[in-house]
Image (cartoon, helix red, strand yellow):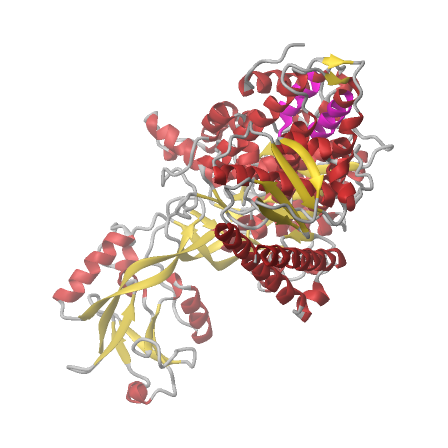
Amino acid sequence: MSIASKYDPAQAEAKWYAYWMEHKLFSSKIDPSKEPYTIVIPPPNVTGVLHMGHMLNNTIQDVLIRRARMLGKNACWVPGTDHASIATEAKVVNMLKEMGIDKKSLTREEFLKYAWEWKEKYGGIILEQLKKLGASCDWDRTAFTMDPALSNSVITVFVDLYKKGKIYRGIRMVNWDPKGQTALSDDEVIMKEIASKLYYIQYKIEGTKDQFLTIATTRPETIMADVAICVNPNDPRFTHLKGKKALIPLINRAIPIIEDEYVDMEFGTGCLKVTPAHDINDYELGLKHKLEVIDILNDNGTLNEKAQILVGEDRFIARKKIGKLLDEAGQLEKIEDYKSNVGHSERTDAVIEPKLSLQWFLNMEEITKPALKSVMEDTIQLHPSKFKNMYRAWMENVRDWCISRQLWWGHRIPAFYLPNGEFVVAKTAEEALKLANEQFRSNYTLTDLTQDEDVLDTWFSAWLWPISVFDTDVFATGKPNEELKYYYPTNDLVTAPEILFFWVARMIIAGYEYLGEKPFKNVYLTGIVRDKLGRKMSKSLGNSPDPLELIAQYGADGVRTGMLFSSPAGNDLPYDDKLVEQGRNFANKIWNAFRLVKGWEIDPSLDGSSNEASIAWFENRFNEGLTEINEHFEKFRISDALMATYKLVWDDFCSWYLEMIKPAYQHPIDQQTYDKTIEIFEGILKILHPFMPFISEELWHQIKERSVEESLILATWPKAENFDPKIIEEAKQVFEVVSQVRNLRASKGMSPKEALDLSINAKNPELYTQFATVLSKLANLSSLNFADKVDNSMSFVVKADECFIPMGDSVNIEEEKANIQKDLEYTRGFLNSVLKKLSNERFVAGAPANVIEMERKKQADAEAKIKALEESLAKLG
């Protein structure tokens, strides 16, 4: 089979993805003889298209699932999408606007018809894009959070938790999104520091001519909702105002001056206005002092009739206008620039309004306890573990979860209201009717029931995901089906830290609540992909490349490896096109290495014994590298596993091994060396496959014709055999000699084609003898000798061995001494750094034994080299 001169990623990607799909090589069925390995995809929103964060997240998942498959596990990666209530409804509303249709003119059923049409048209785009990346999901298992069976399980869980007394309905202060016109949970609020203004407003004391209280606020538009002014009872500045009232500027409504130690005497002017309807702390203060609540904002963020002035104005326009009116009335003392943290909607980016609202809540006090314990005790492990403290802080201070949303797209709350003002909760209207008639001894009909208009928070379905993708009936029956028994708990979850509480914690809560078992064993938390300036990549900033264009330009394997080159768990990825360029270059390097090997002519009559040392070295180095790679995978250091693979392939295999065994130009290679090299190359393709599935599968089949069952995706992951560190170290020493000879040539302007004599004052001459062929070939030597000293030569030291290259009369003794002195100073500095580390008791006590051993070996090597360099200097006088 001939091999093309250049690697064509697009051709390989189209061919092999279709091949894998056609033969269902991603598919997983229950197999009791195999250990399951399960990943559920963090379901992307149906509104989404592939972005750089998805690329990183799904590349890591694919690396893990492909390796598990090769380890002989029954690998099952479940894909799917989330209905994303807020985001999808916004998309559909915008689509309708473009069609000249106002949502308010539609019935719920008419709107949902449009929403489902939109979902069918656009909802699967992102999953199709993931296929371009090489994602080996079991696509037959694709799920959607509003599939009928999954929807049924969500409703079942709501009814169950309500019956258990864990879900309740009540008026609470919630986070209100005026743009989305819905309540949000605390986790859906993003705090941002923004530049604002601090208005110092004068409130006249009732019954006086010129007495005022000055209050500082960033929200002058809410003064019309003030119901009191509060001062600290221990503050002598305000003792004379006890029992008096103040007048709200512009509307002159009298409000009481109350006392509470909640007020910080040192902050601001020492007194504050109390607006229970528009501030959570004021709300708590209002409850304590039994104050009236006046809500002056409509759901869309405009002022209502209770404001008395500027009715219908947007809250931010009203802010500016109120400021101007106060100034004209002489009641604005001053305005200062001020920076404050303001909550924004995670979905619409609108500024959040604290709002008293009748909503549905899940009581989180008891239900969270098993989920906190499992992470703190490492039953579920977070990678990196630094996120445990953040997790604990959230779980120990968790508030009740507001689970209702004022939307139409989503799972409608199964609560039904009755003419008597009561309500019942049931899965269907028919069940609700029966329950209502039993409970209230009445004869209601279906027409008497009105279902709640709200839908459930999107996360209320997502928290069931690792269970519901396998079994949607278990929430009702309590008996897991065979699939759930086999695949649950899943193994590894790969997700972003920003949804550690939105989603991860809640899945853990649901797992313990319904199965008494963790939903996964490991949570790998990726970092954020940022641009070169450190900004998060986003469409609005225009700083994010199009992932599909990157794949077209650099190949999927190039992009996958580029994304992973510098993305350790939990740390942000500073993206640069050079990373994916490096990935593409790596693919080309592998391709060209294969072309080199396949281009050799084989002569079966040749003796291959001269290459035995080279082969023995690389086999040992391969097993050392594989051991390191496996260890990185076990510790979820995916980026490190890739870098170890990269160095093994690029440096050790391509740069050294192939050069060591490569036959002379237009000369054949022996059969034994060729066969061994192909065997080695197959091992390399196996460890490359999880990272670079396309080029590895392509070359796997280029080596020889293989059946479907023999495809690389199904091949067995190599077993790390024992390796001899001595052989590896000796070869490193030989490579160092080669590098030094090459450097010396370059520094003296000598042609690489000019053969040189090399003499070594060797402590162990046998080391160089076994690699004599390699040394002669790679360093282009005319002879290799052993001597204590060679006159008129340039010298260098490798470990404790001094090496000489005769230079005739052209040796500059002073220059030679200066070079040795420079090398000596560097080695002494290196030795000092090693000794400093070894003298650190904490390091020695905490580091693994092999790390300490490595440092002591560095010490011994450095000391031996220093001794040899000092001897070289002494010889030069």
Task: Indicate the position of residue 240 as horizontal and vertical percent values.
Answer: 28, 89
Residue 680 part of the magenta-drawn span: yes
Outermost residue on the top side: it is 1
Q: Residue 193 placed where, x, y %?
A: 37, 58
Asked whether the viewer can see residue 863, the reply is yes
Q: What secondary structure predominates along the stretch shown in magenta?
A: helix
Up/down of 136 relative to 838, above or below = above
Is residue 49 shown above or below 299? Answer: above
Magenta residues (range): 675-702
Q: Is residue 600 left or right of residue 251?
A: right
Task: State the image quarter where residue 144 is shown.
Answer: top right
Q: Number of labelled discs?
A: 0
Whether residue 687 is visible here, answered yes or no, is no
Q: Residue 819 or 322: which is nearer the viewer?
A: 819
Residue 777 in the image: state x and y as whole percent: 66, 29
In the rendered image, which quarter contains the C terminus?
bottom right
Q: Nearer the viewer, residue 313 or 857?
A: 857
- Choose between 160 and 815: the one closer to the eye: 815
At 30% across and 59% down in the image, what residue appears? 195
**In terms of depth relative to the viewer, which is nearer, 379 or 683?**
683
- Name which quarter of the figure residue 722 lies in: top right
Side of 121 relative to 853 (left or right): left
Tell me: 673 left or right of 699.
right
Q: Position of residue 874 (x, y in %)?
A: 60, 59
Residue at 74% x, 32% y is: 614
> Can you say which quadrant of the picture contains the N terminus?
top right
Q: Reply yes or no: does residue 411 show up in magenta.
A: no
* Residue at the extreme right of the image, as rendered: 33
